[in-house]
Image: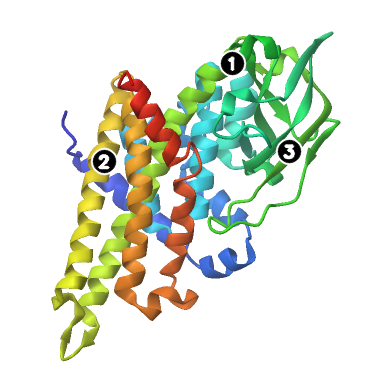
Amino acid sequence: MDFSWSDSQLAFKDRIVAFARTLNDGVAERDHAGTFPRDAWAACAEFGIQSLAISSAFNATETDTEFMTAVLAMEAMGYGCRDNGLTFALNTLMWTVAHPIHEYGSETQKREFLPGMCRGTLIGAHSLTEPDSGSDAFSLQTRAETCEGGYVLRGHKKFVTLGPIADVVLMFATVDPSLGKWGITAFLVPTDSPGFEARPVTPKMGLRTVPMGDLVLNDVFVPEGNRLGKVGAGVSISNRALEVERCCILASQLGAMEYQLERAIAYVRERKQFGQPIGKFQSVSNRIADMKLRLETARLLLYHVAWRHQSGRSAMLEAALLKLHLSECFVESSLDAIRVHGARGYVTEHEVERDLRDAIGGVLYAGTSDIQRVLVARLLGL
């Protein structure tokens, strides 16, 4: 394993950091209002961010990006962009919707959905969680009954990222509950389909600039051509998407952690109490050391998972370890950043506390920390 970056990759990262910084105007206001930044979304598409997940045959840039470089790019977005909700939304679209279509979709599906997603004109959502199906994701109750020409979907989905504004939803439903998880099948459902209801945005603690909400399907007809993959392949498709998503969403968190650390170091050098910079006090410098340790251990896990994925190796265990470790590191370092900044870290004005509110989501979405521990234990044969 060689985790060093080439000069061209580092130059690419620098360009993305510079671009990401242009998206920071009005972040605090958007966060307070819970407003999705469509202009920033369009700017990302024009720059080529949404195209990173897709091959040149279907993306907007007509260039191919290897996976490790895409991970570095999303790390750069997290470092340069202060809107964690925007980077979360981008990763959700790219890796849990566009990437599965690219991997499992028919040629017709790829040409229908991927170019628009890469151009930023088509927003997709990934819909798995239900009112009674969260951590036990594959006990879902949404049904897909066969009918002439396709399927009729009935069910209720919850906490769907981008759901209230999506144009198409990658929807998971079971064709036969008696088959258990082997009956779960994936469908591409346009949100303008008769019987499809997107409910209002659900207010939340953090990541406020990315909308989340419920979806209800009341006898929604989905043509056969909109089934993604084979009948019963939904578990494989979702697991693959989550493995890749965990890597790239966490790359953006890693970038945010690096910016957070740099800002904390600058502050403790500047802030003086008792006649000296507060960084000279061991209790403060120890927190900085802990933040650095979390950053570097998380970075190694992230790059290892990305390397395994690019090399075609299984990364289920490593991805679970990464999800568990990096998400919890972000929470702990966000708490340390607030402590280091004192009252300035606690008040909204200085935009330090927002990272903590955003970081909390990371120990919940894409599999809670508890579920990651269960998964790791099972993969170790326990």
Name which residue type carries label 2: Gln
Q: Taking 320 as reference, is 152 left or right? A: right
- Residue topped by disc 2: 9
Label 1 secondary element? helix
User: Which badge, 1 or 3, comes first in the chain's sequence?
Assistant: 1
Name the quadrant containing residue 186: top right
Q: Which mark is residue 49?
A: none
Residue plotted at (28% across, 25% down): 308
- Residue topped by disc 1: 181
Name the quadrant containing residue 34: bottom right
Q: Tell me whether circle 1 and circle 3 mark residues in contact (CB < 8 Å).
A: no
Name which residue type carries label 3: Leu
Name which residue type carries label 1: Lys
- Residue topped by disc 3: 215
- Of the 4 image quadrants, the one containing the C terminus is top left
Residue 27 horizontal/vertical position (percent) = 52, 65
The answer to whether residue 194 is seen in the rendering is yes
